Image (spheres, grey):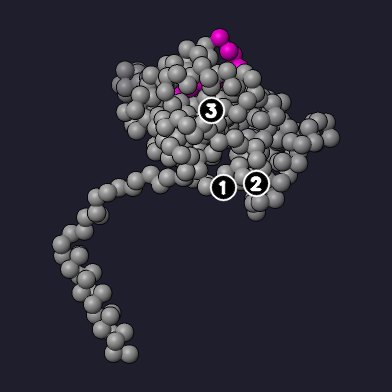
Amino acid sequence: MSATGRREVPRFGHGSRVPGWDEAVDLTKGPATIPDPATTPVPPGLRERIAQAMLKYPDRRSAAIPALHAAQEEHGWCSPEAIDQVAAVMQLTPAYLTSVATFYDMFKTLPMGRHDVYVCTNISCSLRGADEVFDAMREAAEDDADINVRSFECLGACDIAPMASVDGEYIGPLSTEDAPQIVEDLRAGRTVLEHKQLRYRRCADPGVGEETGDFSPPDRGSTEMADTAGLGPEGDNVDRPGPTAAIEVPAEEAEEESSEGESSEDEKGDS
Ligand code: FES
C-alpha cells in the first residue's frame, strides 16, 4: 500500500507492468534517423531486389517484408548493417524495419546458422512421429553451427506429415533415418532429399523437371519410395485416394436442393 492508501502496481525494472520480450527503448538516445544513401553502401544485387519489391506496392513500407528477406539472404541474418542497408534504400528508419523483423519469427535478429530446418511438430505431424524426427534432426545437426534446427507450428503441408521445411523446401514424409541425410546434403550443398521434396512430386506436377532435365526421378523400383513421392511402383503418376465418405447434407437441405433442381429443369423445359 502507498502512503495514500492505494495499492501499488507491481512493475518490472523497465517500468512496465508486463515483462515484455524486446529490449526496452533507450529514451536517452536521439530520434531515429534514416541512413544517408550516400554513406551507406548497399550490395547492388540487394539494392535491385529491394527496388523491385517497392515497385509492387503503392506504399513503399508494404515492401518491408520482402526487402528484409532479401537482406537476410544476403547477410545470413537481419544484422544492424543489413537493416541499415534496407532502411537507406527504402528511406525508412531502422527502428521501423526492426519492429517488423522482431515481430515475425522467420526473421533472424541474432546471428545463427545459414541453413534453416523447421520441423513441424503440430498435430498431424506429431501424430505421425514428428517429435522423434525433431529429436533426430537436432542430434544429427548438433555439431554444426551452420544448421539451425527448430520446431515449428503447422506449415500447411499436413498431407506429407511428418514434414520439415529445409531452407524453404517442403520435405516429407520424414523418418528419423532421414535426419543424417538432410545434414549431409546441406553440408555438401546438394538438393536435400529430392525424392521427398514436395516440388518434385509428380502428383503435384506431372511434368516436373522434364523441361530443364535437372531432376532425376526417384528409384522407381522401390515401392516405398514411389509411394512417398506420389508414384506407383512402375513410376506412373497415381492419384492418391481422396475422402471416400459422401459429404453429409442434412435431410431438409437435400430435399430443398432436389426440389430446386427439379423446378429449374421444368423451367428449362417450358422455355
Ligand atoms: S501439422 Fe505438420 S504440416 Fe500441418
Q: Check disc 3: other Cα within 10 Å, few if <14, some if 14-19, many if 20+.
A: some
Q: Main secondary structure of the magenta part?
A: strand
Q: Which mark is residue 207?
A: 1
Q: Quadrant of residue 71?
A: top right
Image marks 3 and 2: residues in contact by CB distance under 8 Å: no
Viewer-proximal residue among 105 and 254 = 254
Residue that extends furthest to the right in the rendered view of this protein: 38
Q: Earlier in the sequence, mark 1 or mark 3?
A: 3
Q: Quadrant of the C terminus?
A: bottom left
Q: Quadrant of residue 209?
A: top right
Q: Nearer the viewer, residue 218 or 63?
A: 218
Q: Are marks 1 and 2 in contact (CB under 8 Å)?
A: yes
Residue type indicated by callout 3:
Leu
Which of the image's four quarters has the N terminus?
Answer: top left
Q: Give the alpha-carbon distance from disc 3 to disc 2, as whole Å.
A: 21 Å
Mark 1 vs mark 3, foreground winner is 1
CB contact under 8 Å: marks 1 and 3? no
Give the secondary structure at mark 2. loop
For badge 1, the amino acid type reads Gly
- Tag 2: residue type? Glu
The image shows residue 144 at horizontal and vertical percentages of 58, 13
In the picture, the disc for residue 110 is none
- The image's mark for residue 211 is 2
The secondary element bearing badge 1 is classed as: loop
Which contiguous range is marked in magenta?
143-152
Q: Where residue 122 appears, x then y in whole percent? A: 37, 30
The outermost residue toward the left is 251
